[in-house]
């Protein structure tokens, strides 16, 4: 498990770096300072309470570790680091992407443009007063990382909440099956249907996530998955009580739940760039048996629903009506099954296969030359 990182505030002038590690009651402070990097670990009270905190990164340029110093106080660990060569750094770290725990120390911040050449003692004016535009840019940068942190927190809570919801559905179904066996099939929807409806409504947010840039997935693929399930759940199952008692509902909910119990934990790890090899393999392998099973269940439900909707004419419009419009829901289901169901399966399966190849790679056959 990776160690927690404390909040770090930094500033600079032409010769020095100022790094302030926000850690209270620091104990067992271990610092390895080299010309190109710093390695820090300590036990203290930080943003996550009393824990072991650590960080390691490469500097933007070389420093002089022999002349650099640090001191430990009750609230911070304060570094004064000497640059190997005088000059202004465009950033603290060699890496371009700034981590969320790195902040600007505005009380110490200086810039080569905001030095007062007329002041003999090289006193630095307050950057926020003398250079408001520069301060605004720094604030904008901080807000950008705060927005990124907010995005991560939202996605983590969303995926965790969905994971808990599907755990509930799975536990209820498993408990009832272990107790009643096949007799539990008929009342599956009564037991977990409301929970599935809530979870399905929440999944509509997954169409919005790529639209607003929260995730990198395809809007079309997300729409096909979410809308396909919504059609089956809301239009075919929830609206027709006779369909709710069929055993196929149990199998459909079991397949859906099994997929999500792997998908959402995987998404949580991806939010914080934590790769778990087994979970990644499971995410991009378990769909191979589960997706076809789910498609079969959905197809069976559509076929068995057609006679019910022909009888009730629910969601259909007959003449005469004020709109002069005829619509047959059973006919729509037939057209969907004939012309769109199989192509939709192909699109989703192809999409998942491409993702699997991208994440896990493909085995390339090596051609061996025969030696005569």
Image: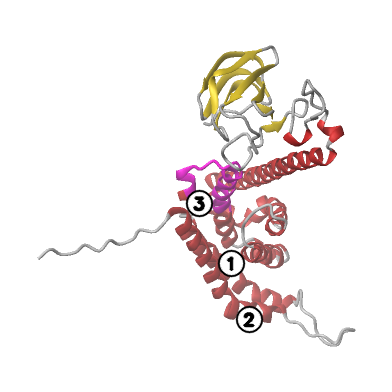
**How far across and how far down the image is residue 203, in percent?**
68, 55
Q: Determine the image quadrant of residue 325.
A: bottom right
Q: Secondary structure at mark 3?
A: helix
Asked whether residue 126 appears in the rendered view, the answer is yes
Q: Is residue 121 left or right of residue 340?
A: right
**How far across and how far down the image is residue 93, in percent?**
59, 35
Work out whether mark 3 precedes mark 2 in sequence or the reverse, and give the earlier one: 3
Q: Is residue 312 left or right of residue 187?
A: right
Residue where numbered disc 3 is placed: 283
Residue where numbered disc 1 is placed: 298
Asked whether residue 293 appears in the rendered view, the answer is no
State the CA–CA distance, disc 1 to disc 2: 15 Å
Q: Which residues are magenta?
A: 257-280
**How far across and how far down the image is residue 291, in percent?**
52, 61
Q: Secondary structure at mark 1?
A: helix
Residue where numbered disc 2 is placed: 335
| Residue for point 53% across, 21% down | 65
Work out whether mark 1 precedes mark 2 in sequence or the reverse, and give the earlier one: 1
- Quarter holding the C terminus? bottom left
């Amino acid at each position: 498990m990776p160690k927690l990182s404390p909040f770090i505030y930094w500033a600079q002038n032409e010769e020095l770096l100022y790094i302030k590690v926000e850690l209270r009651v620091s104990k067992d402070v271990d610092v390895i300072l080299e010309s190109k990097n710093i390695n820090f670990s300590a036990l203290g009270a930080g943003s996550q309470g009393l824990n072991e905190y650590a960080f390691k990164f490469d500097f933007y340029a070389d420093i002089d570790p022999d002349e650099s110093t640090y001191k430990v106080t009750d609230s911070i660990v304060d570094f004064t680091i000497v640059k190997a060569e005088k000059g202004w750094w465009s950033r603290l770290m060699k890496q371009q992407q700034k981590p969320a725990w790195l902040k600007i120390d505005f009380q110490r911040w200086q810039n080569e443009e905001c030095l007062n050449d007329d002041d003999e003692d090289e006193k630095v004016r307050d950057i926020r007063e003398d250079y408001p535009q520069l301060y605004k840019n720094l604030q904008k940068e901080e807000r950008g990382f705060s927005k990124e942190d907010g995005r991560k927190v939202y996605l983590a809570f969303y995926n965790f909440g969905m994971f808990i919801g599907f755990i509930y559905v799975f536990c209820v179904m498993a408990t009832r099956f272990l107790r009643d066996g096949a007799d539990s099939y008929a009342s599956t929807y009564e037991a977990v249907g409301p929970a599935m409806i809530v979870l399905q409504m929440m999944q509509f947010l997954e169409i919005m996530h790529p639209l607003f840039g929260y995730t990198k997935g395809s809007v079309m693929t997300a729409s096909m998955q979410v809308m396909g399930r919504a059609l089956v759940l809301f239009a075919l199952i929830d609206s027709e009580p006779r369909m709710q008692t069929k055993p196929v509902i149990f199998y459909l909910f079991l397949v859906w739940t099994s997929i999500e119990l792997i998908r959402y934990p995987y998404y949580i790890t991806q939010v914080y760039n934590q790769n778990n090899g087994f979970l990644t393999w499971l995410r991009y392998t378990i769909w191979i048996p589960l997706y076809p099973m789910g498609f079969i269940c959905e197809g069976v439900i559509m076929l068995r629903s057609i006679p019910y909707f022909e009888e009730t004419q629910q969601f259909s419009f007959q003449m005469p009506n004020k709109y002069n419009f005829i619509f047959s829901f059973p006919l729509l289901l037939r057209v969907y099954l004939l012309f769109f169901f199989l192509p939709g399966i192909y699109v989703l399966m192809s999409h998942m296969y491409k993702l699997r190849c991208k994440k896990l790679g493909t085995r390339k056959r090596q051609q061996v030359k025969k030696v005569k």
